[in-house]
Amino acid sequence: MAKTLEFFFDFGSPTTYLASTQLPQIARETGAQLVYKPLLLGGVFKATGNASPVTIAAKARWMGTDLPLWAQHYGEPFAFNPHFPINTLTLMRGACGVQMHAPHDFERYLQAVFHAMWVAPQNLGDAQVLTSVLEAAGFSAPTFMQWVADAEVKARLMANTEEAVARGAFGAPTIFVGEKLFFGQDRLDFVRKALA
């Protein structure tokens, strides 16, 4: 029976973007089922007493050089978003909404948002900018906003966030193979071994 690779993610994390570029291939290589679990990173931070690493000046400076190194290592494009931090509540509710109402479009949504956040950075906290990104990717912005406002969609995001915290998550990306937790995009070799 194939193992499951659970990926708890928030678009606002650059390391989550980097992990997202590698996990589909890892899943293919190992025959694992990749399950995307949108969460709200701010909710995880609040529940665990954690905070964004960029709130520590020395770590923020270090990440400014470390992230491009990892992007180069993976062979993936990366540009730090000058609008960071961006409130991702709408984006993450949107991820749940697409999963629930248009699952066949979920991968397209992922690619569009990650690209606009960490490849060709835009201010996705601006409603007009987000509308433009959505429509360029073939989504109806009014329909998307209906999904974002849906009570079941809001509950799904909250439930995912609470589940992640209950299972030991303190940030993103958080990856589970069974009940084994892996944190960060620099632990993917361990994820691959766990799946193999």
Image (cartoon, grey):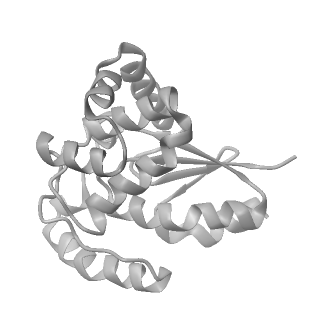
On the image, the x and y values in percent for residue 106 come to: 49, 43
Report the residue at 30% width, 40% height from top: 91
Q: Quadrant of residue 152?
A: top left
Rendered location of residue 5, percent (x, y): 65, 50
Please, which residue is most extreme toward the top here?
151
Q: Residue at x 45, y 36 (%)?
A: 165
Residue 163 appears anywhere in the view: no
On screen, residue 157 above or below 36: above
**What is the quadrant of the C terminus in the image?**
bottom right
Question: Residue shown at 55%/68% (left/top)?
Answer: 22
Location of residue 189 in the rendering, given as x and y in whole percent from the top left corner: 63, 72
**Number of numbered discs present?**
0
Q: Nearer the viewer, residue 46 or 72?
A: 72
Q: Nearer the viewer, residue 145 or 170?
A: 145
Q: Is residue 143 something one can see in this rendering?
A: yes
Q: Out of 166 and 18, give the one closest to the viewer.
A: 18
Q: Which residue is most to the right?
A: 1
Q: Vertically, is 100 above or below 182? A: above
Closer to the camera in the image, 84 or 145: 145
Would residue 54 be found to the left or right of residue 172 on screen? left
Q: Residue at x 41, y 52 (%)?
A: 172
Give left or right: position of 13 versus 167: left
Give the percent coordinates (x, y) of residue 171: 38, 49
The image quarter containing residue 92 is top left
